[in-house]
Image: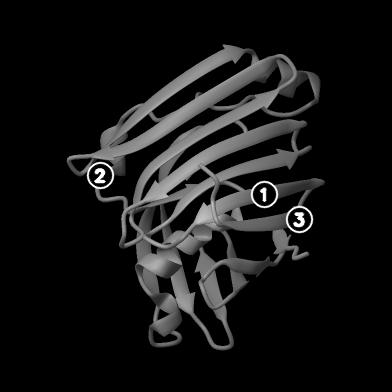
């Protein structure tokens, strides 16, 4: 099914791009492709769906490189997350040959650790920062008041899943501060809450 809108980002942290086709008329439905060469060359494809209130309901991700492929699916049912994974080839061998640390296993050992999570966060993708911004209506919220969320972070290319705490703080002039335990960045977003500039990570490109 063709989707009505398109977003395109150029990565700043590595040679790479992300292209997302989206429908944001009733929550968010998106299909996207990420091409990156860090830490190794790989392609990441994802499908994302939220409910009408922008709470995450489904994320399906596949990463693929020379000699390996991995997939993970997160699906919310009866307030609990179900996580299904698959793997072919040997990502660890490719990472080791390139001088990088081994990857974690795809998925999460105990999906109940994700209980109470309302947002998914695909590592390196500025699209998923929009989810809490819209769900919490941060562009209409009082500035400089922080909102702590629990998110399901999907690392790429390993597709390891972990629960993380994150803080979003609306600022002025279309900016939202995103912070985790070890990192913070002031995101510039458009009127719909989509990231225009993520310092150090990605910048939206328009035609």
Please tell me whether residue 204 is drawn above or below residue 39 in the rendered image.
below
Name the residue: 76% across, 55% down.
10
Q: Earlier in the sequence, mark 3 or mark 2?
A: 3
What secondary structure is marked by label 1? strand
Please tell me whether residue 173 is drawn above or below residue 193 in the rendered image.
below
In the rendering, at what x and y percent does residue 157 appear?
62, 33
Residue 132, located in which quarter of the rendered image? bottom left
What secondary structure is marked by label 3? strand
Q: Is residue 152 visible?
A: no
The residue wearing badge 1 is: 19
Q: Residue furthest left?
A: 78
Q: Alpha-carbon neighbours of circle 1 within 10 Å: few (<14), some, or many (≥20)? A: many
Residue 37, located in which quarter of the rendered image? top right
User: Is residue 90 shown left or right of residue 180?
Assistant: right
Q: Earlier in the sequence, mark 1 or mark 3?
A: 3
Mark 3 and mark 1 in contact (Cβ < 8 Å)?
A: no
In the rendering, at what x and y percent does residue 136 appear?
35, 70
User: Is residue 160 shown left or right of residue 52?
Assistant: right
Q: Is residue 57 visible?
A: yes
Name the residue: 54% across, 73% down.
177
User: Is residue 6 shown left or right of residue 42?
Assistant: left
Please tell me whether residue 23 is drawn above or below residue 140 in the rendered image.
above
Check residue 46 in the rendering and tell me which mark sits there, or answer none.
none
The residue wearing badge 2 is: 115
Cα–Cα gap, marks 3 and 2: 33 Å
The residue wearing badge 3 is: 10
Name the residue: 71% across, 57% down.
9
Q: Alpha-carbon neighbours of circle 2 within 10 Å: few (<14), some, or many (≥20)? A: some
**Colouring scheme, one of rainbow, by chain, secondary structure, one colour:** one colour
In the rendering, at what x and y percent does residue 67 appear?
71, 14
Q: Earlier in the sequence, mark 1 or mark 2?
A: 1
Name the residue: 57% across, 46% down.
123
């Amino acid at each position: 099914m063709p989707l009505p809108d398109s977003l395109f980002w150029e990565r700043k942290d590595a040679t790479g791009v992300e292209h997302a086709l989206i429908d944001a008329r009733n929550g968010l439905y998106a299909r996207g492709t990420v091409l990156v060469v860090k830490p190794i060359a790989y392609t990441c494809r994802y499908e994302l769906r939220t409910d009408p209130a922008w709470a995450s309901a489904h994320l399906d991700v596949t990463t693929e490189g020379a000699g390996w492929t991995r997939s993970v699916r997160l699906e919310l049912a009866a307030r609990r997350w179900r996580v299904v994974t698959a793997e072919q080839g040997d990502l660890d061998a490719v990472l080791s040959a390139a001088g990088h640390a081994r990857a974690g296993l795809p998925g999460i050992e105990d999906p109940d650790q994700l209980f109470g999570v309302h947002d998914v966060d695909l590592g390196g993708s500025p699209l998923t920062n929009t989810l809490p911004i819209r769900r919490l209506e941060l562009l209409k919220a009082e500035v400089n008041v922080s909102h702590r969320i629990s998110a399901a972070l999907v690392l790429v290319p390993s597709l390891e899943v972990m629960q993380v705490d994150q803080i979003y703080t609306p600022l002025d002039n279309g900016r939202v501060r995103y912070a985790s335990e070890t990192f913070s960045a002031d995101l510039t977003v458009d009127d719909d809450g989509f990231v225009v500039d993520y310092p150090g990570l990605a910048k939206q490109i328009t035609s």
